[in-house]
Image: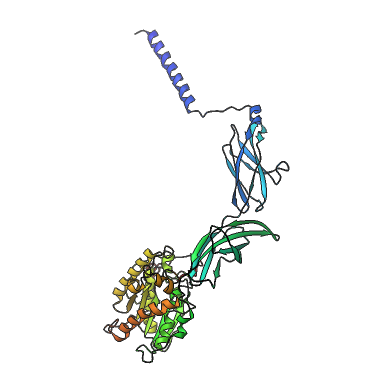
Amino acid sequence: MSRTWYRHKFIRFIACFIFAFVIAAAFSAEPSFAVSKSAFKKSVVTVTKVTSVNYNTVKVTWKTVSGAESYVVYRSTEKNKNYKKALVVKNGSAKTAEVSKCVTGQKYFFKVRAQKKFSGTTVQTKEGTPVAGKAKLTKPGISLKTITRTIRVSIGKVDGATSYKIFRSKKKNSGYTCIKTLSSKKDEYFDEGLALNTKYFYKVKAIRKVSGKQLGASTSKVVFAVTPSQDGNAKKYDVSKLEPLEDSPFMNKRIFYLGSSVTAGAYSENQSFVDFLNKRHQMIGDKFAVSGTTMIDRNERSYVSRLNQIPLTEESLDCFVCQLSANDARVGAVIGEPIGPKSNLKKYDTMTVAGAIEYITAYASKNFDCPVVFYTLPAFVSSYYHEDIYLEMRAALLSAAELWDGKLLVLDLWNDPTFDYDANHEYRGLYMVDAIHPTKAGYELKYMPAFELFYEQFFLGDLGKTEAEDEPDYTMDSVSDDEIWIEETDEDPGDYSGI
């Protein structure tokens, strides 16, 4: 082939390469939208809406304009004058901005202009029609809990509120009167002395005042609660009305009770099954119960911490009873696995349910020289107290009882058919404040018979009696750091209304 043919072939190759390069560059390059200075100046930024974010902040929304490099938001308390720059948004594609430092309830007008530099000079568009908006308090939350003739109103607090007004009516859409004003430091109110078998509607208004003037208010949704048809905390169910048995086989039996609000009787004027048993059988039962506390050692209020504060007595105990607290389920406690009797108390991981159960058992068995009994709560359905987790706790308790060979006993009220309040309206209304907490009638007519039956088997039967064994020599010494796991936890969330 001639030299000319090769020369033409080389030229065609170069031409094709240049063409391909130009096409690729054209497709890969970002599109350029050229906007003239005059056209940009004539553009208009339209504000579409102004919405409240919280008590001192609003969100301004607008339509973008072509070529914008940034946006300037202007604010005024007057529609047609005295606009001042509120903020600059350095993003040409932005459509919203939050403007803070607003006075709650004050009506503001907003305009927006787009900005772009032309030859080093910043040019602004026109602004559209101003749009008004106010910064408002967010709606407060509200929830109710019925306690016989009392309804507890709990408030979900909001930022910026200085007080809360609670309104009540027997009709959903009318007739509301303010029954209480709470300071911003409080979040609950007990509405007492209500009629039985009555529906009450409630709503809460969050108030913000500055220099004595009310600058904003926001109202919650409307909720209702129904008081029970019968009053289980009536005087006729008081422990003082109970007649003692002169020949009770449990007379003078000395028992310590460790627990939280079910043991304490938090919703029954501090009268629980312990007080009814003491009165009826002339027993000597001492309550060491604090509402809202957990077994796991998450703070100084826990069962484990308070157990160490119970004074030792020279008089021997006949039994040590502990409540399997649903507060552990409420806080999502780790269940863990029981490990059985150990000589060193630090072997028990008291940040787990199983470890707390066994620590309490070991400590009480050693220091009070008596059997230990844990009682479960009757079956309940509660998303707040997580009955599924409580069932896992119960399973761990039953497993631990097997390992302790008669030194740890279980009074399992969960499976007791006499506590079937879900299927029996009278039981719910008369015997229970809610799914968990009993009334005085509930303690006297349901809890006390269950404990009487257990004590009959315990003191008069063979329940819990085992052949004599050498007790482990419990200590708190000689344990390495890798043999015990202690978790750093936050403080208690402060909900001490639980069991």
Q: Is residue 460 above or below residue 375?
A: below
- Inspect this view and state whether residue 370 appears: yes
The front one of 426 and 492 is 426
Colouring scheme, one of rainbow, by chain, secondary structure, one colour: rainbow
Q: Quadrant of residue 385?
A: bottom left
Query: Residue lying farthest left?
Result: 467
Q: Report how many numbered discs are placed on residues in the image.
A: 0
Image quarter where the N terminus lies is top left
**Left or right of residue 29, residue 124 in this image:** right
Query: Residue lying farthest bottom?
Result: 246
The spot of residue 403 in percent (x, y) is 29, 74
**Left or right of residue 263, residue 411 in this image:** left
The front one of 15 and 246 is 246
Residue at 37% over, 63% down = 388
Query: Residue lying farthest right?
Result: 82
- Inspect this view and state whether residue 490 appears: no
Residue at 44% over, 64% down = 384
The spot of residue 230 in percent (x, y) is 45, 73
The front one of 494 and 475 is 494
Q: Is residue 346 above or below residue 127?
A: below
The spot of residue 218 in percent (x, y) is 60, 56
Residue at 66% over, 38% down = 129
Image quarter where the C terminus lies is bottom left
The spot of residue 37 in percent (x, y) is 65, 28
